[in-house]
Image (cartoon, rainbow, N blue to C red):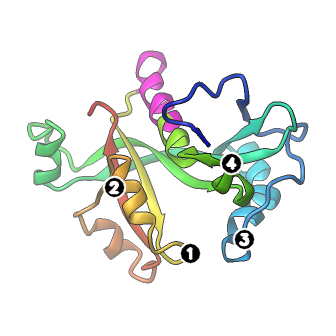
Amino acid sequence: MIDFLTDDVSSLFVIEKLSEQNLNDSFMISEKFAEYKSFLYSNALIYQSLFISQTFLLIEKESRTIAAYISLTADTVALKPSEKKKAGLNEIPFLFLPALKIAKLAVCEYCTGKYKHIGSYLIRFACIKAFSVNDRFMACRLVSVDADIEHNPGILEFYRKNGFSPLKNSVYKKKFPNRTKTVGMWKDIFS
């Protein structure tokens, strides 16, 4: 079984920005995750054209099968003093810090049995993207995600294994009290 974290997958896969040319009907996912398939085929290109999010496809080179995708957008994250201290930012006087948000991340059902760590590979891709903006045009310190516990109760452990911590600050919960189906999480791209 190919492991995306330890094997060189560059001869088998490519990451491409979503376009009408590379969006084919090969992305299959179980019915309980239908929202993720619907997003890819109904919303991702629209959101991209409106500059809401950018979606990147992980594509098998030979078959052009969409193995997974990740959708990214801008964010700010409110950290409590203890969280800022953990990141070495305790002297920063403001509450909100710049972040790149993983808006959606999904792996094709077929690929989860054939390959290991595709989701973790895409998280690394997001961290590289977040890091790269620091040299180009703006500052970005964190990667954030609203972990979807409604569709996948085990998702928190997946993000923890990838270096994310649950947000302790309740600003988000106060602003959106009816959104209890996700857990806000963050990761420092410098750790």
Toward the viewer: 156 or 17?
Answer: 156
Q: Where does the image place residue 88, in percent across and percent down from the top left?
A: 13, 36
| Residue mark closest to the camera, 1 vs 3 | 3
Callout 2 amino acid: Arg
Per the image, the residue denoted by label 2 is: 160
Per the image, the residue denoted by label 3 is: 30
- The earlier-in-sequence mark between 1 and 4 is 4
- The earlier-in-sequence mark between 2 and 1 is 1
| Residue at the spot 45% in from the left edge and 65% down from the top edge | 155
Judge the density around disc 1: few (<14), some (14-19), many (≥20) Cα neighbours within 10 Å: some
Per the image, the residue denoted by label 1 is: 151
Image quarter where the C terminus lies is top left
Per the model, the C-alpha gap separating discs 2 and 3 is: 24 Å
Secondary element under disc 1, as helix, strand or loop, is loop
In the image, 169: left or right of 153? left
Per the model, the C-alpha gap separating discs 4 and 2 is: 20 Å
- The earlier-in-sequence mark between 3 and 4 is 3
Per the image, the residue denoted by label 4 is: 68
- The earlier-in-sequence mark between 4 and 2 is 4
| Residue at the spot 10% in from the left edge and 53% down from the top edge | 82
Q: Give the answer, above or below, for where 169 lies relative to 181.
A: above
- The earlier-in-sequence mark between 1 and 3 is 3
- The earlier-in-sequence mark between 2 and 3 is 3
Q: Give the answer, above or below, for where 38 lies relative to 61.
A: below
Callout 4 amino acid: Ala
Callout 1 amino acid: His
| Residue at the spot 81% in from the left edge and 31% down from the top edge | 61
Q: Where does the image place residue 145, in percent across and percent down from the top left?
A: 44, 55
Q: Is mark 3 in CB contact (under 8 Å) with mark 4? A: no
Magenta segment boundaries in residue numbering: 125-138
